[in-house]
Amino acid sequence: MGDDNAVVGVVSARQPGAAPLTVFAAPATGDEFNTIGERLVPKGCFKVEDVLFDFGSSFIRPEIGRHLSQLADLRNEHKIRDPRTGEAVFPPLSIFGHADPVGEDADNKRLSGRRATAFYAMLVRDVDLWEQLFSNPVGQDNWGTRSIQAMLSRVQAPIGVTRGADEETRTAIKVFQSANGLPADGVAGPQTRSALFRAYMDALCGPDLQLDKEKHFLARGVDAGGKGDRQGCSEFNPLRMFSGSEAAAFERQADKTERNDENAPNRRVMALLFAPGRRVNPARWPCPRVDEGVAACKKRFFKDAATRRSFQAERRDFDATKDTFACRFYQLISDDSPCERVTPVITATYRIVVVDEFDTPLPGVSVTLAAASSGQTSPTNSVGVAEFIAASGGALVTVRNDKALADALAALVDKPPRDEQPLPRPGFAAITPSKTSTSIPVAAGSTHVIMIIARTDVVFELPQGWEDLEPSAPGPWQLSKSGSRAVLRLVSQGVGRSVTLRCPASDELPFSGTFPASPLWSPDRKRLLQPGETLASLAEKYLGDASEVDKLVALNPRLGATTSGVAATQAVPVTLPPDAIPGWLSIPKAVESEVGAIPEAVFATIDVDALHDALFRGDRDAVWDFLSALPRDPRSTSKLSAEHLLEIFTQSMLADLRAATET
């Protein structure tokens, strides 16, 4: 089999769409009608390579678990919403097993069908199908004790994976039985196997990948034998065919290891994903059931199938020659598939370290690495490290913002925000929690550190009448008060949470406030052009598109030259269209609130992630939007402005972190 670690294990990819269907149709009359059927074209593909099965077996190895999130992601990427019910409609799957061109057609059809069945049963949690495979070995495909040991090692403490049942295995079985309310006799009988199969399936697939036979497969589970939903294609569609001389040389060798390694690309299970809503009638599906013979397969062969299946003068790979598949139907639906190709993959190790802003490792955080057409997901270990073996040449990394990460970040509320800039260094990236889905480029063979910045302190003076201020609900925030000074400690989790500061019910809340002038706007609500800004950049910011610059030129004819990108002089006033002027500028500089019976008063509602990200970007306009909404105490001598707010936020160094990342 070779070195398993040198193989990616799966390929997950979108498929290119078919060309638009063009037809000429005559008008129908009377009881006639025209029917036009769209070609069945997959939208995506997910290939499980041979390395994720034991050799000659349909038992799925535990290593597949780190890859199955890609299938879940691929399904989510192509799902749509039913306009009538609003329910999610996922792309239906059909699963094809393939064998290598060694041995008899019928034997290879059984093995390829059993592998397709094993994968299908795992996705739908059909333990009865796995019991059939376990209890009815065929040839070398005998799950046996080795599979029990492998499954136990995945769902509880690892044990040795051997060919025989030893005392360690019996003890592990007893542990599993006791944990699952079963008689602890140390024997993996049918009842124990059923529970173990289900636990193993759940451990591999996780909660995000459990499919329904009637909703999520192409033939909707109508046929009891799985026709249309799963099939074995025997050795009829190999990706690689040896040359005649290679085949003869391999045949003479007593040790078939080299031949088997070279044939590995042919041994695979392919899941094709079709357009949401598509379905087929299994009675008209061309592929036979997994337990049927090869006769129906051969009815779909190319006329030159005998030539295609023969060893010729030169080695042939399907992605280069397109003439190694014997089945016309399978080639029709998979011809352009990025999964159906043989490309030597040079692999390398990628080491990703995830830390918080205090350089403390974050364990249990899901990291996804995408390299070439493959991707894999792995949690960080106890020291915050996730390692991957994938195609060299560079990859993209994302961090999954799940409960594990949110909980780890929430615990930071008791710590003061970081007040020093980390040293710029190769392989370093600083991101905020709301940007974890942003792809970060990483190089092979080196360590990359991803620092997640989450803490912010808001320091402000309590205006008169707001001394009883408190957060309205618990969350990753704390409010402390000392005299008229308040500190709101915030943790951004990137999940869109807001904190509302309220006062309890009161008979009266006297308040008068002043709103200081923004340094970016003149008193008559004109934007003051800053160094390096142009009318084009203002058009992009306030009108949404730099191409709208002509509107600003018309309103500011004397500034037309700045549209060329030449930096303008500081503080030049620019007139904007009324609908482009921020709403907060309309708030009077002096506001007198009415005094009366108020059941509950809201001091401020703060979008934690938006504020945190604005500080990280150094976006003064966005920060000022927040600042202008806060009540002010007219007795205060503090001068609050956008610049001052950036100073009193302990996290004012976030912009520096961004600069360090860009460096």
Image (spheres, rainbow, N blue to C red):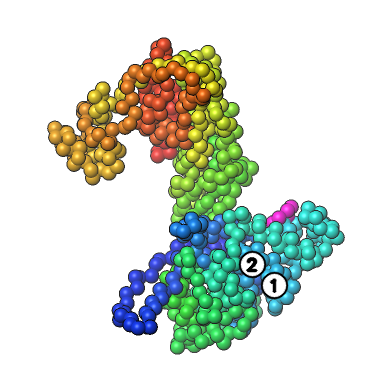
The residue stretch that appears in magenta? 154-158
79 horizontally vs 186: left or right: left
Where residue 177 sits in the image (x, y, percent)?
80, 57
Q: Amino acid at mark 2?
A: Ala
Q: Quadrant of the N terminus?
A: bottom right
Q: Nearer the viewer, mark 2 or mark 1?
A: 2
- Looking at this view, is 157 or 593 the one in front? 593
Could you tell me if residue 625 is visible in this image?
yes
**Residue drawn at the location 49% of the way across and 85% of the way down:** 301
113 horizontally vs 510: left or right: right
Q: Amino acid at mark 1?
A: Leu
Q: Residue furthest right?
A: 185
Q: Tell me if residue 156 is in the magenta stretch.
A: yes
Mark 1 surroundings within 10 Å by alpha-carbon count, few (fewer than 14), some (14 through 19), many (20 or more): many
Residue 195, picture quadrant: bottom right
Mark 2 surroundings within 10 Å by alpha-carbon count, few (fewer than 14), some (14 through 19), many (20 or more): some
Q: What SS does tag 1 mark?
A: helix
Say the numbered circle drawn on residue 623.
none
Could you tell me if residue 47 is visible in this image?
no
CA–CA distance in space, label 2 to label 1: 10 Å
Q: Main secondary structure of the magenta part?
A: loop
Residue designated by label 1: 133
Residue designated by label 2: 121
428 horizontally vs 205: left or right: left
Is label 2 in contact with label 1 (beta carbons under 8 Å)? yes
Instruction: Pick whichever of labels 2 and 1 is earlier in the sequence.
Output: 2
